[in-house]
Amino acid sequence: MKYGRFGGQYVPPELKGKLQEIKKEFKEAKKDKKFLEEYQYYLKQYVGRPSPLYFAKNLTEKVGGAKIYLKREDLNHTGAHKINNAIGQILLAKRMNKTHVIAETGAGQHGVATATVCSLFNMKCTIFMGKEDARRQQVNVERMKMLGAEVVEVTRGEQVLKDAVDEAFEYLLKHDDVFYLIGSAVGPSPYPEMVEYFQKVIGQEAKKQILKQEKHLPKAIIACVGGGSNSIGLFHDFLYDLDVDIYGVEAAGKGLETGLHSSAFYMNKVGILHGMKTYIMQENGKVKDAYSISAGLDYPGVGPEHAYLKDIGRVKYDSVTDDEAVEAFKTLTRLEGIIPALESSHAIAYAMKIAKKYKKEDSIIVNLSGRGDKDLNTILNLL
Ligand SMILES: *Cc1c(COP(=O)(O)O)cnc(C)c1O
């Protein structure tokens, strides 16, 4: 197996055929110059890549220690890294002559990215969203509808993300014209490897940029981990640079000891969820609800490659609390004039903790996965 004992395809036999088709198409697409050119074209002209690698001088001076660089995924069209993957997968759907794209969404971010590319490529779009999530994320529901998507509110289970995923897989099974566009490095094979492939542009660019600006590799790279797509996108090109320390940051919510958090690694239990074997938050044999102030980190599992990278010790996984993330949110906003997403604020908070461990002439890269406009209400409610 690709990720040691993790990953795989834990799905009903009827679904395996469909996954096999996607796997075959993806393998061919990667060798197809025209497909790759089209993907690059949209990244450049539509998403706005390459995103800058910005030296956060004020933050660096305040924190002390290594120079902190920010990879500006917040400047992408739609305001986060998710669009990179949405473009890649919809081009694959087009290649497979699919006419209808479905997706699940929790906070609505991936739903908006999917609805966006469906408008662009004139595809029918259905977004599954837990009824409870839809209530909490009304603005994103309206954005998706504005973009032409149908939003199906899922009423099974706890009416949240994991229930929306189950509903999406069932819908996929019953419809032949449908492509399921998964938004993070999770799910059954080949999704985790596909999402990594379409997100690895983040690390490829960052590596070139830091070599140009600093003439040497960074001492450390840092990203927040929900399902694990912005992080694996940054990490991919650095995995074999063994002098680079790699950190993945989960959400410790109100504190790991309170039980109100989203750290699958802290729970340290392996299980099966959404077609993959990986670390999953469980209690008494049931999936435990994840909690974080940032909706995008609020997922009870983690992508299988991260599980593998933890086991072999290549990446160090740690966590940051709500309070620390909010503090980092305010600090970056005030010092650099950049309002980060609350998800990304976890990575920034961690960078602020570890920068001092390195020397002044060293550099570290933090993935600024998205912009924080969407989080202003959450922050205002705290004040
Ligand atoms: C969705 C989201 C995340 C978390 O998802 P990953 O797949 O772990 O990257 C992080 N940051 C932002 C801004 C997001 O929208």
Image (cartoon, grey):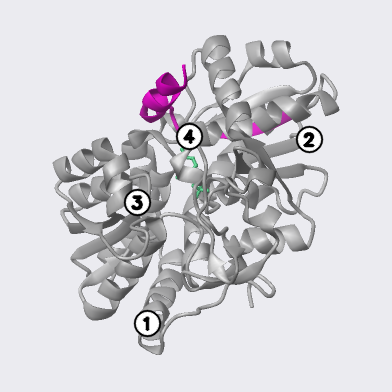
Residue hosting label 3: 87
- In the image, taking residue 330 as reference, residue 28 lies left or right, namely left
Q: Give the structural element (helix, strand or loop) at label 3.
A: helix
Q: Residue at coordinates 74% horizontally, 27% vertically from top-left?
A: 353
Q: Give the labeled residue for mark 1.
A: 15
**Distance from label 3 to label 1 (Cα)?**
24 Å
User: If you read the primary sequence from the N terminus, does the residue marked by circle 2 or circle 3 appear first?
Assistant: 3
Between the residue at mark 4 and the residue at mark 2, the CA separation in whole angstroms equals 21 Å
Give the Cα distance between marks 2 and 1: 43 Å
Kindly identify which residue carries mark 4. Answer: 73
The residue that disc 2 covers is 219
The earlier-in-sequence mark between 3 and 1 is 1
Residue type highlighted by circle 4: Glu
* Residue type beneath disc 1: Leu
Is residue 59 positioned above or below 234 on the image? above
The segment highlighted magenta reads 363-383
The earlier-in-sequence mark between 4 and 1 is 1
- 375 above or below 46? above
Residue 248: tell me if it is visible.
Answer: no
Are the residues flagged by discs 4 and 3 in contact, CB closer than 8 Å?
A: no
